[in-house]
Image (spheres, rainbow, N blue to C red):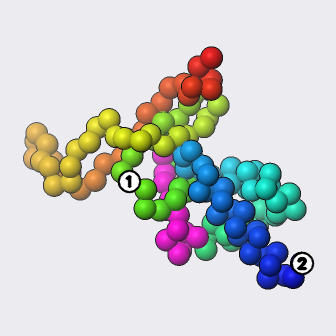
Amino acid sequence: MTDESRRTAQREAVARVFRDAEGPLTTQEAFDRAREILPPLGMATVYRAVKRMHEAGQIRAVTLPDGKTRYETAGLAHHAHFTCRICDGVFDLDDCPACVPAGATLSGGFRVEKHEVSLFGTCPNCAD
């Protein structure tokens, strides 16, 4: 395997992890999942791939209330995130329970530009 094909396989493993994710991932989570696809993958390679994908607009950064920067596929429709208090998994919800349109004016004169909603509780896997 040539160096270039190895690098391409590494980048593709990282890209696949984000495409298949049920929610935004930290770089460590992306690394752990990508190693299941390509065991010899190194953490530095994942950092470089994430940086490159972010700069290219393929993934976007998401900062949730836990303060960790996570990344998710760019171009997703507006959605909320759900964090499981047991497994710490973060999941995308298909819709937003608090849809407030951009440009809306709230009482007190607050003009909405955008919003993000994070919900917390127990995911279906941990609820059993």
Q: Does the magenta stretch include residue 58?
A: yes
Dot 1 or dot 2, earlier in sequence: 2
- The magenta span reads 53-64
Name the quarter where the N terminus is drawn. Answer: bottom right
Question: Looking at the picture, does residue 128 appear above or below residue 79?
Answer: above
Residue 75: x and y in percent read 43, 62
Q: Residue at x 80, y 51 (%)?
A: 36
Quarter location, residue 76: bottom left
Most foreground residue, 91 or 37: 37
Residue 10: image tag: none
Name the quarter where the C terminus is drawn. Answer: top right
Question: Looking at the picture, does residue 18 appear above or below residue 50?
Answer: above
Residue 77: image tag: 1
Most foreground residue, 48 or 8: 8
Residue 11: x and y in percent read 70, 70
What whole-number distance in Å separates the C-alpha atoms at marks 1 and 2? 38 Å
Question: What crowding class fits label 2: few (fewer than 14 Cα within 10 Å), some (14-19), or many (20 or more)?
Answer: few
| Residue type at tag 1 | Ala
Question: What crowding class fits label 1: few (fewer than 14 Cα within 10 Å), some (14-19), or many (20 or more)?
Answer: few
Quarter location, residue 2: bottom right
Quarter location, residue 5: bottom right
Residue 119 relative to residue 97: left or right = right
Q: Does the magenta stretch include residue 5?
A: no
Residue that carries the numbered disc 2 in the rendered image: 1
Residue 60: x and y in percent read 49, 62
